[in-house]
Image (cartoon, rainbow, N blue to C red):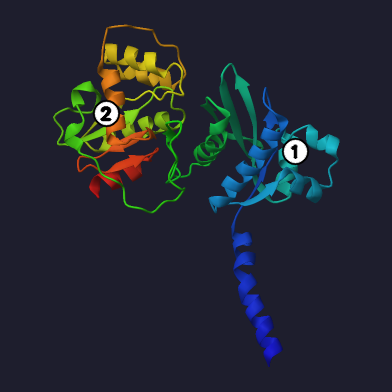
Amino acid sequence: MKKPLLIFLAFLFFLPAFSSAKELPKIAVWDLTSGDIKEAYAQDLTLILASEVSKLGKYEVYSQANVRTLAGWTEERMKLGCTNTQCLTALGQMDIAKLISGRIGKIGNRYSLSLNLFDTEKARSERMISEFCRSEDELIELVQVAVRKLLGAEAAPSVPAQKVPGKTPDPPGSAREPRRVDFSKIPLKNALVMGDSNSPLKIAVFTDPECLPYCASLHQEMKKVLQVRKDVTFYILLYPLPNHKDAYWKSRSILCNRSVKMLEDAFAGKQIAKIECGTKEIDENLELARDLGLEGTPAIVFPDGRVYLGSQSARQLIGLIDK
């Protein structure tokens, strides 16, 4: 009696794995090609890329090595890539619905990640994105953000803020209650305004023009919120982090012009004019951020004093507004 029972329990244990594998479409993740960076980095980031796709729970993920084994292709054949019609069709015949290929490189002082999503049934590119960052330390988070954008997934709930050097970040996934500060101490006169200044809900956002991709991502999500919530105004306080070498003068220039457009140009990697107007507001913002204990950017402060570090999606922001 025990033996049939054990077999039955084992069957129940493995059944979900078999059924979920059947239901999920297959996606192949090709090795990232490397530009002006270490080959080992490209290899490690490829593994992270595949892991992030798998975490979404939408696909059964196959690595390039898996595909080579299934297809029996030679190493030389694999080096040719798989963006042509013949190769994409071959993947489709293996019941692989999608393919992600990409390149990680460096242009000047900026790192770039370009990803391409292919539909094997139609044998064509479905979507392509490029993301940028300024240091090797940001490459892992860059991959995480890029995967979600490429596959149309909701932004990760705990995208980290860029930290002031020397500060210890909270552990990932920390469930503690957000700490609170005195919102009345924030001088909104030092801020750029997004939305109707007469709106009843005022939210302060500390940002850095060189905080990529997190501050730039949050900025776009804030614009989406304003499209549906006319009762909200975002007050942007420029908080240049010391490890971003041009952030201070860019912040001063943007504030001298009181220009959200200049900030958006900086986020887009465009050159902005260096303007001097003798403003002391950036220095006041730096002192204020220290007094409030803000450890990095972006930092969002709600009217009741709740503080959230890191990027949020529009849906998450609305949820926090209504909380």
For image coordinates 55% across by 27% down, the residue present is 135
Task: Compare marks 1 and 2 and give the one earlier in the sequence.
Answer: 1
Nearest to the eye among marks 1 and 2: give it. Answer: 2
- Figure quadrant of the N terminus: bottom right
Disc number placed over residue 177 in the picture, else none = none
Q: Is residue 92 above or below residue 222?
A: below
Between the residue at mark 1 and the residue at mark 2, the CA separation in whole angstroms equals 57 Å
Residue type highlighted by circle 1: Cys
* Residue type at numbered disc 2: Leu
Q: Which residue is mark 2?
A: 288
Q: Position of residue 115 (x, y in %)?
A: 60, 33
Do we see residue 205 in this rendering?
A: no
What residue is pinned by disc 1? 87
Q: Residues within 10 Å of mark 2 (few under 14, many from 20)?
A: some
Q: Position of residue 29 (x, y in %)?
A: 66, 42
Sort mark 1 into few (<14), some (14-19) or many (20+) by Cα contacts within 10 Å. Answer: some
Q: Secondary structure at mark 2?
A: helix
Residue 118, quarter of picture: top right
Q: Residue at x 55, y 51 (%)?
A: 55
